[in-house]
Amino acid sequence: MKKILLFTLILAGLVSCKQATDVPQIDLTLSKALKNNAQLSEFVTQAIENANELARACVTMHEMAREYLEVDFDSLPPEQQEKIVSLDYKYVEMWYNFNVKYTSQTMQLLEILKDESIPKEELVEMSKAMAQVSSFVQQLKDTYGQDLKLDPHAVPVQ
C-alpha cells in the first residue's frame, strides 16, 4: 500500500512539473438580462473568447521567449538572431491583430449603445461585462506587454 501511495505522489509531482504556466482567464457569467438578448450575449461572449485567446497566446509566446531573455544577442549566430527577431515580431504582430479586432469590437459596441430599441437594463449589463473584458485586456498589457523586447537593436516606434 505504501509503495502505491509513494508511486502516486511521485507521479503527481512529475505531472505538475510538466504542466504549462497558469494562463490568466476571464470567466464572466452572463446576467439574465444579457442571456435574454441573443445579439448582446453573442457579442459579449465573443469579446470574452477573444480576450482569453490573447491571454493564451501571451503565455505561450512568453514561454517560447524565456530561453532568450538571458542570452547575449550579438554573440549568437545569425540564424539564432533571426529566430529571436522573428519571435519578437510575431508577438508584436499578435498584439497588433488583437488591437485591430478590439477596435472593431469597440466600434460595434458604440453602434449597439446607440440602438434605442434595446432595453436600458440590457445595455447596462453589457457595458458592465465589456468593462470587465477591457480591464482584463489592460491587465494582460500590464503583465505581458505588447513587445517581448528580445531584439536589442529594434527601432523604437515613435
Image (cartoon, rainbow, N blue to C red):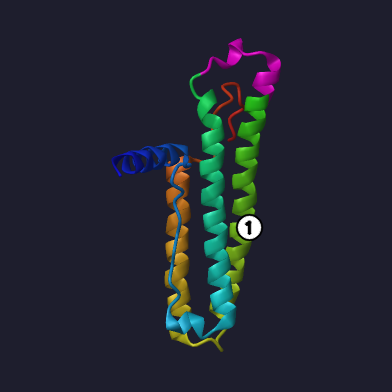
Q: Quadrant of the N terminus?
A: top left
**Is 19 displayed left or right of 95 in the figure?**
left
Q: Quadrant of the C terminus?
A: top right
Q: Residue furthest left?
A: 2
Please report the residue visible at 58 percent of the width from the left and 74 percent of the height from the top.
42
Residue 152's place in the image compared with 147, above or below, is: above
Q: Residues within 10 Å of mark 1 (few under 14, many from 20)?
A: some
Q: Residue furthest front?
A: 1
Indicate the position of residue 109 as horizontal and vertical percent values: 56, 70
Indicate the position of residue 115 as horizontal and vertical percent values: 57, 83
Residue 32's place in the image compared with 50, above or below, is: below
Residue 26's place in the image compared with 95, above or below, is: below
Q: Is residue 70 magenta?
A: no
Q: Is residue 80 magenta?
A: yes
Secondary structure under tag 1 reads helix
Indicate the position of residue 13 as horizontal and vertical percent values: 38, 38
Please report the residue visible at 51 percent of the width from the left and 86 percent of the height from the top.
36
Q: Which residues are magenta?
A: 71-82
Which kind of residue does numbered mark 1 sit on? Answer: Lys
Q: Nearer the viewer, residue 68 or 15?
A: 15
**Is 27 displayed left or right of 114 in the figure?**
left
Residue 118's place in the image compared with 6, above or below, is: below
- Quadrant of the image occupied by residue 26: bottom left
Q: Nearer the viewer, residue 75 or 24?
A: 24
Do we see residue 151 in this rendering?
A: yes
Please report the residue visible at 52 percent of the width from the left and 35 percent of the height from the top.
63
Q: Nearer the viewer, residue 72 or 16?
A: 16
Please report the residue visible at 56 percent of the width from the left and 61 percent of the height from the top.
49
Main SS of residues in magenta: helix
The residue beneath circle 1 is 101
